[in-house]
Amino acid sequence: MTDGAQAGGQEPGRSGETVELRISVSGTHTRRDDLEALHTWLKSAPALEEARERHELGVGRKDSLTQTEGMSGELIQDIILVVSVEVARSVSENAWRSVETWLRNRRRFADPEETPRVTLDGPDSGPGSGLGRDTARDTDRDGPPEAGPESGGRNGARGDEPGEV
C-alpha cells in the first residue's frame, strides 16, 4: 500500500503544488473490502486515465480518520487522491462520477441492513476546500447501475466479514 505522499508512485503536477482529497466508505459490513474494491476501481477508471498519464493524479491509501470501536482495533485506510492544484476540480468531478458508478453497483449487492455511503473530503481551507462530496446527498439511492465510459473496472467481491461499519 502506498501512503498519500507517494500515491501510486507518482508525483502529481508539474508545478509541484498538490491537493489531497480523501475518499472514505461507510455504512457496510465489509468496509475494508469495499475500500479495496473502490481503490482498484479508481486506479483503472478510464475517466481518470488522462490525469494519471500526465502525472496530475496519484491514487493511494492513508489511515482513516474515522476509526470506530466496531473495528476491534483493526486499522482501516481511506483512499487518497493526490491531485495537481491546476486540475483539482475537473479530476475530482471525474473521480466522483466513477465513485457514483461504483456505489450504484455496490448497492445492488448490499445487505438490507447496509446503507453504503462514500464521502470525498478536501482540505478545510485553501485550494481544494470546496470539492467535498457525499453520496448521502449527491446520489440517487435507487438509480440503476452503470457501465458507461466513466466506470472504473471490475467491482471486487464482497467478503462476509461481519462487524465493519
Image: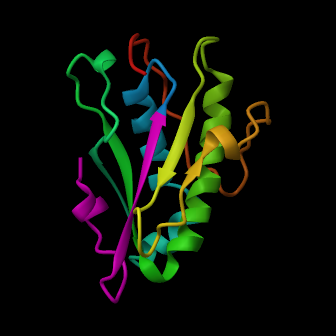
Q: Which residue lies furthest to the left in this view?
A: 73
Q: Give the total number of marks visible in the rendering.
A: 0
Q: Quadrant of residue 127?
A: bottom left
Q: Residue at x 39, y 12 (%)?
A: 163
Q: Residue at x 23, y 63 (%)?
A: 5
> Looking at the image, is 143 positioned above or below residue 69?
below
Instruction: Give how far across and how far down residue 47 sits, in percent.
Output: 60, 63
On screen, residue 125 versus residue 149, left or right, reads left
Q: Which residue is drawn at 44% across and 70% down?
A: 52
Q: Quadrant of residue 118?
A: top right
Q: Residue furthest right?
A: 143
Query: Was residue 80 drawn as part of the magenta stretch in this picture?
Result: no
Depth check: give the residue in front, 28 or 127.
127
Q: In which quarter of the image is residue 113?
A: top right
Instruction: Give how far across and how far down residue 134 sits, in percent.
Output: 59, 46
Q: Which residue lies furthest to the front in this view?
A: 125
Coloring applied to the structure: rainbow
Depth check: give the residue in front, 128 or 56.
128
> Looking at the image, is 20 positioned above or below residue 103?
below
On screen, residue 99 versus residue 145, left or right, reads left
> Looking at the image, is 82 positioned above or below residue 106?
below
Q: Residue at x 60, y 30 (%)?
A: 106
| Magenta-highlighted residues | 1-25
Instruction: Give how far across and how far down residue 116 sits, in percent.
Output: 57, 28
On screen, residue 127 versus residue 110, left or right, reads left
Work out which quarter of the rendered image holds the C terminus and state it. Answer: top left
Query: Was residue 14 drawn as part of the magenta stretch in this picture?
Result: yes
Instruction: Give how far across and how far down residue 77 sits, in percent.
Output: 30, 39
